[in-house]
């Protein structure tokens, strides 16, 4: 079945540092890929998405490129802010006519001033 | 435009009881999915409804059930509660079906079983 693997453990970094969170996936066919963010006490918000190979999703300074050859969708941001502190989830959907999402375990990101 | 509304936000129940959670999707959205979030297992898919029909079901015991009404509102029910059912239950609504469809999540219902 479909599955998503995120790098283990929380990520702690200083303000203005470069952020990378690794995500790899296993899926049949051509899934869509997503990054969701969860702030404390909140539900999930879609951060960005990519629906086909080599697509780059971007939003609020975050970027991720759909790499089919490496089955990866790594999240990057060039200069993080304290307000970026949250939990980040990689997810995939499809193929098929349903909306079922498979999520990675998530990564807690803590940005220190 | 109102977002996805889940009620109640917090719930405390005793083992063996049953519970019903409610989700009102974004107006016009016909698909509702439910997820369980726990620290150990992460986010796990429960089921998905579209136009009152269950389209997909995750790997959960039969104690977990759901339904969708003609106005797209959805409820999920958990019977004979166990301590391990303590979790954040998230509802997501989508306009249609398909892998490109964006899911909008509610704030969740925090269920604690004691």
Image (spheres, coloured by chain):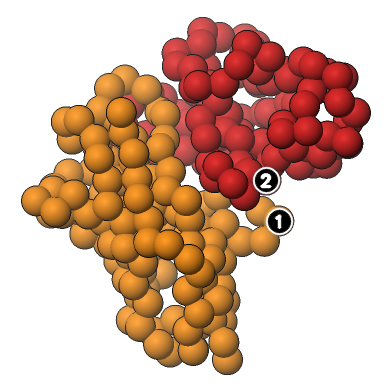
Nearer to us in this view, A74 or B81:
B81
**CA–CA distance between discs 2 and 1?**
7 Å
Q: Colour of chain A?
A: orange
Check if mark 2's residue and mark 1's residue have beta carbons within 8 Å.
yes
Judge whether A108 appears above or below A89 on screen: below
Q: Residue at x 32, y 63 (%)?
A: A22
Is there any visible trace of residue A63 in the rendered image?
yes
User: Would residue B51 appear left or right of B6 to someone viewing this image?
Assistant: left
Badge number at residue B107: 2
Chain that is coloured red in the picture: B
Q: Residue at x 72, y 31 (%)?
A: B85
Judge whether A92 appears above or below B21 on screen: below
Question: Residue A8: where, in percent of width, then height?
Answer: 43, 62
Is there any visible trace of residue B108 in the rendered image?
no
Question: Residue B28: where, in percent of width, then height?
Answer: 53, 26
Quarter of the picture holding the N terminus of chain B: top right
Q: Secondary structure at mark 1?
A: loop
Question: Residue B97: where, in percent of width, then height?
Answer: 38, 23
């Amino acid at each position: 079945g479909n599955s998503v693997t995120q790098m283990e453990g929380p990520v702690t970094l200083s303000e203005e540092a470069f952020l990378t969170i690794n995500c790899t996936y296993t899926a049949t066919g051509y899934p869509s890929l997503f990054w969701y963010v969860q702030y404390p006490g909140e539900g999930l918000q879609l951060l960005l998405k990519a629906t086909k190979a080599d697509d780059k999703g971007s939003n609020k300074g975050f970027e991720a490129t759909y790499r089919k050859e490496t089955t990866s969708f790594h999240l990057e941001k060039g200069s993080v802010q304290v307000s970026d502190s949250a939990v980040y989830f990689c997810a995939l959907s499809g193929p098929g006519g349903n909306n079922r999402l498979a999520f990675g375990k998530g990564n807690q990101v803590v940005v220190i001033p | 435009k109102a977002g996805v509304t889940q009620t109640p936000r917090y719930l405390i129940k005793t083992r063996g009881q049953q519970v019903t959670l409610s989700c009102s999707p974004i107006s016009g959205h016909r698909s509702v999915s439910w997820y369980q979030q726990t620290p150990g297992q992460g986010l796990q898919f429960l089921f998905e409804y579209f136009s009152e029909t269950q389209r997909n079901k995750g790997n959960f015991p039969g104690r977990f059930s759901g339904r969708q009404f003609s106005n797209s509102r959805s409820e999920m029910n958990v019977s004979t509660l166990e301590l391990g059912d303590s979790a954040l239950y998230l509802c997501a609504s989508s306009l249609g079906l398909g892998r490109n469809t964006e899911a909008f999540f509610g704030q969740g219902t925090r269920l604690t079983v004691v």
